[in-house]
Image (cartoon, grey):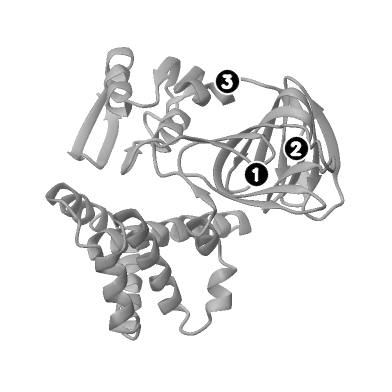
Amino acid sequence: MSQHHILDSAAAYAQLQQEAMAWQVLLWSGEVTADQQHAFEVWLAISDAHQQAWSEIEIMQQKLQLVPQATIGLVRHKMPSAKRRQLLQLLGLAAVTGSAIPLVRQSDSWHTLAADYRTHTGQQEKVVLADGSQLVMNTSTSVDIAYSARERKLILHAGEIYISTAPDLVQARPLLVQTRHGTATALGTKFNVRLKQHETRVSVDEGAVKLQSANGLHGLTIVSGMQAGLLEGALSKVSANGNENAWLDGRLVAEQLRLGDFLDELSRYRTGVIRYDETVANMLVSGVFPLLDTDRVLQSLLQALPLRIDYFSRYWVRVHAA
């Protein structure tokens, strides 16, 4: 088995663990609907790997019984719904590692849940920062704001952001976005940063952005209309912008895009799961689609391509060849 295949398998199982954690939080919150319960049962039955991931969550739940009941009761009954789920998840993460809270705080899950600003699936949000810079967060995004006397730093833990920078009139501090792959420093600009599993993709609308890899060995400056990627200890080649920022207008634009890639992108904006057969993955899609109505997008695909779409529940969709 190749090293690349091992890494992909590990990443896929890590995603299953995250999904299992999300189901645990929902089910334990006491707010689950009948449709959500059915969706969970469908998810659990998909494969042995799903059942293994869930069994690990059940072990975690047993450990969670060691958390003082007064604390659990406070979280369950005294906190607002959204914050309650977040804190229940943090308690679950703490239970997995016993008393090793410092390790939890270093994890991606901790940073994602405890970030200064977060959006959920399908949600977008605009924020005006203390210096007047404007931040737009795309779906499933979490970001920390770390302004200091030396710099204005945004730490992107997950998702995608668009930044319109404002000049720092007091100290002329640089504004930069940091991810696990490196940093993107604004040079008077508007730019987009998307954090993917193996890459941070940066595209520039106005001005320029300086990229620096996490190991400090590679750097380049990209200008308006161009994009490049921060990789693990490297940088990708510079290329022209496409339709990456159409999400700002609530649109998904496809130009001869593989259906598999299209559905993967659409799934970022839809609660639940979109699965597709490999027999349809290489079909090509073109068009402009509304991100706020993913059901409408799926139905439009039936008019353009020889497909069949099965809805096992509101949260589980599978796309086949007709």
Pick whichever of labels 2 and 3 is earlier in the sequence: 2
Mark-to-mark CA distance, 2 and 3: 18 Å
- Quadrant in which residue 316 is drawn: top left
- Where does label 1 land, which residue? 199
Q: Measuring from the top left, give residue 125's x and y in whole percent.
A: 48, 36
Q: Are marks 1 and 2 in contact (CB under 8 Å)?
A: yes
Are the residues flagged by discs 2 and 3 in contact, CB closer than 8 Å? no
Q: Could you give the CA–CA distance between mark 1 and mark 3, rounded to whole angstroms?
A: 18 Å
Q: Is residue 184 left or right of residue 19?
A: right
**Foreground residue, 249 or 135?**
135
Which image quarter holds the C terminus? top left
Q: Which residue position is annotated with label 2?
A: 236
Q: Which mark is residue 123?
A: none
In front here: 68 or 74?
74
Report whether 211 appears left or right of 253: right
Amino acid type, callout 3: Asn
Crowding at dot 3, Cα within 10 Å, few <14 / some 14-19 / many 20+, comes out as: few
Where does label 3 land, which residue? 243
**Labels 2, 3: front one:** 3
Dot 1 or dot 3, earlier in sequence = 1
Does residue 20 appear in the picture of this structure?
A: no
Toward which corner of the image does residue 282 lie, by quadrant?
A: top left
Q: Is residue 197 visible?
A: yes
Is residue 253 shown above or below 277?
A: above
- Number of labels in the image equals 3
Image height of 227 relative to 231, above or below: above
